Amino acid sequence: MLDLLVPGLMILIAVIGLAKKQDVYSALLEGGLEGLKLLLSIAPALVMLLSAVHMLRASGAIELLTRFFSPVCKLLGIPPETMPLVLLRPFSGSAALAVGADLMSTYGPDSLIGRTAAVMLGSTETTFYTISVYFGAAGIRKTRYAIPAALIADLSGFVMASLTARLLFTPL
Amino acid sequence: MVMGFVWVGMLVLSVIACLAKQNLGVLTPAALEGAASAVTLCLSLAGPLCLWSGLARVMERAGLTEKLGRKMRPLFCRLFPQAGRDELALGYLTANVSANLLGLGNAATPMGIAAVKRMGQLSPGPEASDEMCRLIVMNTASIQLLPTTVAALRASLGAASPFDILPAVWITSVVSVTAGLLAAALFGRARRA
């Protein structure tokens, strides 16, 4: 079933586009260019951040951080190794992507930690950035309870990501 | 601005940790390795990201976002009683959320901003309304049916089946959006009481 997801989706989207009399191929190329431009725009951030993350890992600071947070993590059921991701996620999308990529390549994309990191990345957002962009553009200065409510959503996302990754993928 | 401090903080922390262990020599190769690994990551991400962004553009052109938006109208009239009565605000809202669902982040943000602006006209003032907070929570909690960047990342790092995290992502998203909306409802009521 899952093997058909991507090819099926590709065909479905293209066929719907053709049925709506759209120039599907030029839309593909146009969107693809946009995707590459997006990647190019985050590439420098990924270089800077992965450089810093590798330094943190080599120095042993990540290990210290992990050990420091492990009691809280145990309480919440979050793997302590994902703590750097949890801490950076609300502030910076590219930093979270860099740390997530580092976790996935260190522990393996199909490991429990790698999967937890992937689920965390896929089901949370760059909260503070989103709030500042949306409210900034609309001229809202008093955000009231938007930030605490959004952070509660984030926290439950991290806890649930750890839980679902653990329950749906028994570690090998 | 914040990121500047975060970055410097990461570097200072590494130096301190190395000083404590007296292994400062590891930092230079690690910095260069990290930079090189970022470029490798970008190269392996480029293909999947390009492919998906192309498909996303086709979805947009074919009007899938609008179609999904129309299906969600009844739900939105409930969640946003004031904005739901305004044709323009409702249009922006549904466009924002359906673009998010389809993973079209680039299309979602302008629609979300337009929705917040329109809601600001409906209830003027510098203060966020309850409905605005609800919209913010729905956007910050991320509701994606296809988390394509993460799947691309997993694929580029050699995952056996990059999309097998989908059910976990869906469950997590539903729970976190619900928790956020519940928290918003509680906070909103507490302020009014």
Image (cartoon, coloured by chain):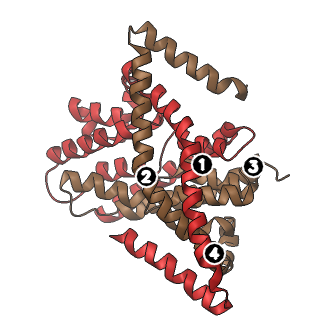
Compute the Cα span from label 3 to label 2.
Answer: 25 Å
Taking depth in this image into account, of A14 and A116 the one nearest to the observer is A14
x and y, in percent, of residue B97 in the image: 39, 37
In the picture, the quarter occupied by the C terminus of chain B is bottom left
Which chain is painted in red?
A: B
Palette colour of chain A: brown
Question: According to the image, label 3 marks what residue?
Answer: A110
Question: According to the image, label 2 marks what residue?
Answer: A42
Q: Secondary structure at mark 2?
A: helix
Q: Which mark lies nearer to you, 3 or 1? A: 3
Q: Outermost residue toward the right?
A: A172
Compute the Cα span from label 3 to label 1.
Answer: 18 Å
Q: Secondary structure at mark 1?
A: helix
x and y, in percent, of residue A149 in the image: 42, 60
Question: According to the image, label 1 marks what residue?
Answer: B172
Compute the Cα span from label 2 to label 4.
Answer: 24 Å
Q: Badge 3 sits on which subunit?
A: A
Give neighbour class at mark 2: few <14, some 14-19, many 20+ (Cα, 10 Å).
some
Q: Is residue A142 left or right of residue B157?
A: left
Q: Secondary structure at mark 4?
A: helix
Give neighbour class at mark 4: few <14, some 14-19, many 20+ (Cα, 10 Å).
many
The label shown at residue A62 is: 4
